[in-house]
Image: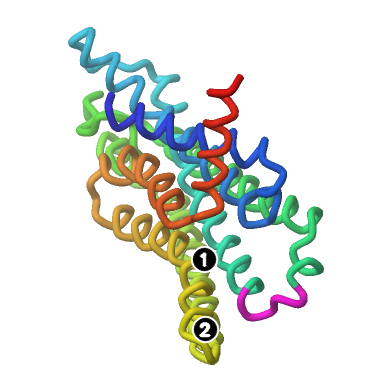
Amino acid sequence: LGISLAALLGNGLIIITTACDQHLHTPMYFFLLNLSLLDLGAISTTVPRSMANSLWDTRAISYTGCVAHVFFFLFFILAEYFLLTVMSYDRYVAICKPLHYGTLLGSRACVLMAAAAWGTGFLYALLHTANTFSLPLCRGNAVEQFFCEIPQILKLSCSHSYLREVGLVVVGACLFFGCFAFIVGSYVQIFRAVLRIPSEQGRHKAFSTCFPHLAVVSLFVSTGTSGYAVLYSVVLPAVNPLIYSLRNQELRDALVISGLKKQMM
């Protein structure tokens, strides 16, 4: 409950601040707003049901509820990863091609890239969920997890027709490594550009704009590959706004100003 409230508060503040403050209407903060929306969606998919089960001393969930769990969690997590890939491109253009930043990342381009991240996550989640629940489940109905997750669902299946599932896993792996390679390649170019900046202050300023994104990507990949569902489904959405707010002076200033305005009113 404490972690979920922290996630709701942190992401909610980022969404409200970036939406209301005109100074934050830039591509970087537009993508950050989308990231906070996805974090809220991810944690709202799993935690409320888990808390309700704890309060009511039950572990039951309907078949429809389990399908919804799988679909929405996959959707939000995958869309977040694709959005982090887009955000690496934003940082690459800002540091390596600053004179073309307004042209390459105009309003239309930002909306299209964000929509592509959301749409790709939606499509892949839909295909994966439909394929998983098309398999017959005949090995009981106990999921060894605090929310419905595809590997746990597949353990309950007695079907040997895993060809479609393998195909989707291969496609997912290609998408994952493709995005990861793009992020790594972007940061190789970013580091090369930063090292060419003559002043130490300039290098520090340039790198500080990339640190929150780099930290979130590292946390996302490390928790996602750890196998511990609590880490990537609960902790990650709560930590992301903390990382961005602590390392971002503009966002901290905007939060302080908005708080002062509320006190004055």
Task: Identify the secondary structure beneath mark 2.
Answer: helix
The residue tagged 1 is 209
Q: Is residue 24 left or right of residue 215?
A: right
Q: Main secondary structure of the magenta part?
A: helix
Q: Quadrant of residue 193?
A: bottom right
Q: Earlier in the sequence, mark 1 or mark 2?
A: 2
Name above or below for residue 157 compared with residue 197.
above
Q: Nearer the viewer, residue 3 or 172?
A: 3
Q: Position of residue 75 (x, y in %)?
A: 51, 41
Q: Residue at x 62, y 46 (%)?
A: 118
Mark 2 belongs to which amino acid? Val
The residue tagged 2 is 194
Q: Quadrant of residue 196?
A: bottom right
Q: Quadrant of the C terminus?
A: top right
Q: Quadrant of the N terminus?
A: top left
Q: Position of residue 185 (x, y in %)?
A: 51, 79
Q: Which residues are magenta?
A: 95-100
Name above or below for residue 59 compared with residue 70.
above
Q: Residue at x 81, y 68 (%)?
A: 103
Q: Nearer the viewer, residue 263 or 187?
A: 263
**Alpha-carbon span between mark 1 and mark 2:** 11 Å
Q: Residue at x 29, y 53 (%)?
A: 223
Q: Position of residue 233 (x, y in %)?
A: 34, 40
What colouring style does the render use?
A: rainbow
Name above or below for residue 132 compared with residue 169.
above
Q: Position of residue 190 (x, y in %)?
A: 53, 80
